[in-house]
Image: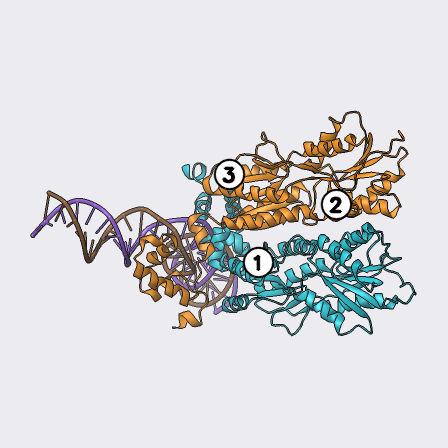
Chain colours: A cyan, B orange, C brown, D purple
Amino acid sequence: MQRNTSRKRANLRDVAAAAGVSVATVSRVMNAPETVAEATRKKVEEAMNSLHWVPSAAARAINTGRTRFVGALVPTLDNAIFARMLASMESRLATHRLSLVVATTDNDPAREAEKAKGLVDIGAEGLIVSGVTHAPEFYSLIERCQLPVVSTSFYDPHYQLPTIGYDNAAAARTALAHLTDLGHSRVAVVHGPSASNDRTQARIAGLENHSPKSDLSFYEVPLSIAGGCEAGRNVLQAEKQPTAILCLSDVLASGVLFELQRQGVSVPQEKSVMGLDDLAGSAHLFPELSTVHLPVSRMGAAAADAIAAWVETQKVPAACLLRSDLVIRASTAAAASDGG
Amino acid sequence: MQRNTSRKRANLRDVAAAAGVSVATVSRVMNAPETVAEATRKKVEEAMNSLHWVPSAAARAINTGRTRFVGALVPTLDNAIFARMLASMESRLATHRLSLVVATTDNDPAREAEKAKGLVDIGAEGLIVSGVTHAPEFYSLIERCQLPVVSTSFYDPHYQLPTIGYDNAAAARTALAHLTDLGHSRVAVVHGPSASNDRTQARIAGLENHSPKSDLSFYEVPLSIAGGCEAGRNVLQAEKQPTAILCLSDVLASGVLFELQRQGVSVPQEKSVMGLDDLAGSAHLFPELSTVHLPVSRMGAAAADAIAAWVETQKVPAACLLRSDLVIRASTAAAASDGG
DNA sequence: ATGGTTGATGAAACTAGTTACATCTGTCAA
DNA sequence: TTGACAGATGTAACTAGTTTCATCAACCAT
């Protein structure tokens, strides 16, 4: 009597006793109900309900070696693009009966390695990371633990981990091509810190070795609305004014847009502004932002599926390339033909 | 020999064997190192390192009854305000050696109850939720499990759970007062869905029973930039035009701002626009948004501290009121004195 | 009637830790 | 010299599940 009432949580033995069966039978009701006689199963289920019993995930984990949770390491939650990705990851992982533990890295490989270690220590079965630049300790950790890790926001079939993402260089090139098609030959390129961000690096690289005769100038600012404003001010102070501003991220484009408005520069009449990401809000900015759509939600879901498949079947999933599409809205227009 | 190499992860017994001590001693090295002789401790630590051993969190959880993780239930990750709160929660929880599992509820109490159940099933020691409206199953769950739960984004010292948040009604009133002080008597109030969002309800209630003679009209739209745009269009179609638009959330204010610009309405000359939240980007919008600052980062940290204290000491933490402050920027100005 | 097979169940040994209690050694005071 | 006690360590019993293997009854074919 006192067991059920005064004592804390019921355990498997309590349920077995209440149902008048052995612990093995209770365990079977959970894991292989078809092997248990109908009547017995009923009895056990009643006992479970009346004791409000839920199996201890920890005890299960100890036996099966499966904790059923994975970790996600993202640079920040402050950029909507990662928040979006995590949201879709979480819901997709739930369908695989997997939980998600989130850790932020601030784009610092050392912190990433540290947090990854923390996630492994608490039993993460797999990790989802962003990009391809990681600390040596990170690599040694995943090698030592034989840990399933998939990398997002980047596609590279030759990378040592499966990558689920898009071709950043191509996406940037698509954006630039749109501007050059419109006749813009002098273009300011605004981007976030590149030193520790391989996605940014790839986007820049995509522009540098492919632009057909365009005159590009680069502006590196913090990856935020404020950074975009700063870039806007910097661009307007340049000696040779570009006719278009290509932002390698939509948050930067938003900031640029706001700053240009503040300075009385009309978009797209005086300057075209191009983004890259296609955040949910970008379609509603003034003017509506032309950008390159990156399928982050689909990417989150795909990464979730990939890591789930890996931890479930032990088979390394294939890399997955998601296409990025040009979306032309109101912030870009043909260059004024004054020839600079 | 084959143990270390071919077999998977080392366990406590392996370490004990390698160090030539008993399992109890290894356990002591971890949990009460001062009771172990210096030389013995060294030996054990060497064995740990050479076997790359990390204790199994699951096994530890089973014994101590502590899983060291808490769950956070947020409506969405798409609003920067929750992303921000989670980021600060996560880092603060880490200082308490607690991990955070995130689940989104889409503002649906049923889904919240369901996800809460899921979190409890996987061993969450405590929960952090938003607001005070929850499903009956949610309450019965936390009662049955005696689960520590703190509620954020809301302050109410009489609520059955400790609340860590601000006074939403007062914050809304502060925003409105700023507008009335500027001479705006006809104000459009734009807000997100109120049916299942008690913060929104409280903000609206704060306006309704306190406005000194102002003429308020309410516009309910989806809580997003797009929703803000929609509201902007609706307001402009109203017969009696308001001189100011009070948005009960900064994301809505952003949308309103964009839409007004699109329609050629100048802010703050023709209409003042007021927000509520003070998101990181709001200070950089065009025009810079006047708003009421809500200390979400501090709130996240405070909630993390509260839940940590609760699970650690079993003592229910006190409710915590965080102040909200008016921040006047460029989107509000004195009403044109044409008397409408 | 007997042996073989299947289906349902239980006993006990696992998983990886913690911890209560026992044991052993060495020091110090009586 | 002996008893008391502290300090260091080990033994074994816990935690809450899963799983292997054994058992036993029922049914069917011989």
Task: Label 2, secondary structure: give it.
Answer: helix
Place of residue A328 in the rendered image (x, y in percent of width and height, measured from the top left)? 84, 60
Query: What residue type is disc 1 on?
Result: Val
Query: What residue type is disc 3 on?
Result: Gln
Task: Label 3, secondary structure: give it.
Answer: loop
Dot 2 alpha-carbon crowd within 10 angstroms: few under 14, some 14 to 19, many 20 or more? many
The tag on residue B251 is 2
Disc 3: which residue: B146
- Please identify, in this view, whether the residue under mark 3 or under mark 1 is nearer the observer: 1
Place of residue B243 in the rendered image (x, y in percent of width and height, measured from the top left)? 85, 35
The answer for how far apart the CA atoms under marks 2 and 3 are is: 37 Å
Give the letter of the chain under mark 3: B
Label located before the other in sequence (2 or 3): 3
Query: What residue type is disc 2 on?
Result: Val
Question: Which quarter shows the C terminus of chain B?
Answer: top right
- In the picture, measured across the screen, residue A322 lies left or right of residue B2, that is right
